[in-house]
Amino acid sequence: MRQRSFDLLKILREVEEGDFTFVEGDFPPVLSGARGLHVRDVDGNTYRDLSSFFGVCMLGHSPDFVKEEARRGFYHSMGDLLPSREKILLLERLSELLGGSWKGLLLSDGADAVEACLRTAFLFKEGKRVVAFEGAYHGTSLGALSATYSRRFRARVSSILPFESVFFPLEEGSLEGVEEEMKRGGVSAVIIEPVQGRAGIRPAPRRLLEGLRELTLKHRVPLIFDEIYTGFYKTGAVFAKDLFGVEPDLIALGKAMTTAFPLSACMGKTWIMEVWGKSSGEASYTFTFSGNPFFSRVALRALDEYERIKAGERALLIEGWIGEEVKGRVRGIRHRGLGVLHAFDFAVPGEGFRAFRWLLQRGWITVPSGLSGEVLEIVPPFIAEREVLAEFLADLAAYLRL
Ligand SMILES: Cc1ncc(COP(=O)(O)O)c(C=O)c1O
């Protein structure tokens, strides 16, 4: 019995809306600290984290550069009114990383970045519909949710979603239907994750991405890549767009950008960002924390660190290790992996969540995912070593033998 967790969860039940955290007795353990790969709970148990907490903490927990930046102070400014130096430098750095001729807008959560990309597309192309893909996850705020596939997320708010999405299967064969949809008119954007994350690491076929690029150019519809999950070296390339060799018009970034703080970006090619026009004194789309100087400074340090450790090469190394270990040890489950993104597909609804709970008891942090909870995912940080991955896979194999 995790008594301290149990006591805190009792309070949580009283103070948090009931549909947010799943609570059952002393589950889940309440966390109290983390460093590197190691996480502690309030009852003194320790875990090794192979989730990077939703693919965010890609340099391990509590890296020293965050502490250094925290000591320097200057935590907040007035985003659009009095910009900070670090916000400007981060936008410049992101533009360079994307290949030049990109402009953007800094926001907080991933859903904010997706919505800013969608808003840019709607400003550019009049219409009320978006082409999206089965399995897509773009966030749960109303605009992002409109392009998110899962019925579970949409169920109780479907009547108030701001626009309609037409969902196609994530396969090359969808191109014909997508073109028909565009010919009907009123399509303002195509949005796609180059590799679906929450649906259980499902890469889009290269031909689908290439075909979407051709169609969107032909019909002058903006193409948005949601790289909130895949961005910043996770697939081995800086962005998945580079891996597939397909350039979108707009890209949503978040998660690993700071390795810890809510900072996201909507980046667009210079020509499409012109639709926002020129400020006449007050921004028409703005948020209190847009371009927060502390988060921006941490992001700049994280981007330096990714370069220093050659994060892309580390991702490919990890992909190779996991592939070899899975071949040697893990039977009876389908494995999909790309860079540090890995899914174990049980093909049984809810089994990902059961495996997650069992592995948590053994001291591993993973993420249940898939449209019906049938998948277990890991997103190890770039600092993970082969031994720890092998140990984890031995435990996963033990679970499969139960
Ligand atoms: C591909 C993708 N888009 C958007 C989001 C939403 O990001 P956030 O939860 O920060 O709003 C996520 C989150 O998991 C994601 O994986």
Image (cartoon, grey):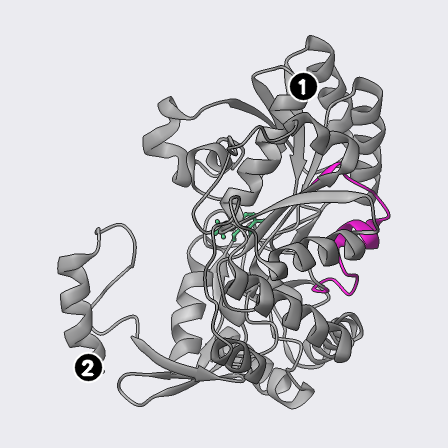
Residue 56 is a magenta residue:
no
Tell which circle, 2 or 1, labels the residue nearer the N-terminal end: 2
For disc 2, the marked residue is: 4
Q: Quadrant of residue 298?
A: bottom right
Majority secondary structure of magenta residues: loop
Residue 247 is a magenta residue:
yes
Is any part of residue 220 visible from this angle?
yes
Is any part of residue 344 visible from this angle?
no
Q: Residue at x 65, y 72 (%)?
A: 301
The relative height of residue 45 versus residue 128 in the rendered view (above or below) is below
Position of the C terminus, as image quadrant, is bottom left
The relative height of residue 265 versus residue 51 in the rendered view (above or below) is above
Percent coordinates x, y for residue 361 in the rendering: 37, 81
Q: What range of the chain is rendered magenta? A: 233-251
At numbered mark 2, what does the secondary structure look like: helix, strand or loop?
Answer: helix
For residue 32, side relative to residue 172 (left or right): left
At numbered mark 1, what does the secondary structure look like: helix, strand or loop?
Answer: loop
Q: Nearer the viewer, residue 130 or 344?
A: 130
The relative height of residue 335 versus residue 179 in the rendered view (above or below) is below
For residue 349, side relative to residue 99 (left or right): left
Q: Nearer the viewer, residue 389 or 232?
A: 232
Percent coordinates x, y for residue 43 in the rendering: 26, 86
Percent coordinates x, y for residue 228 in the rendering: 60, 52
Q: At label 2, which amino acid type do we have?
A: Arg
Q: Nearer the viewer, residue 354 or 52?
A: 52
User: Residue 22 has which mark?
Assistant: none
For disc 1, the marked residue is: 125
Q: Residue at x 53, y 85 (%)?
A: 36
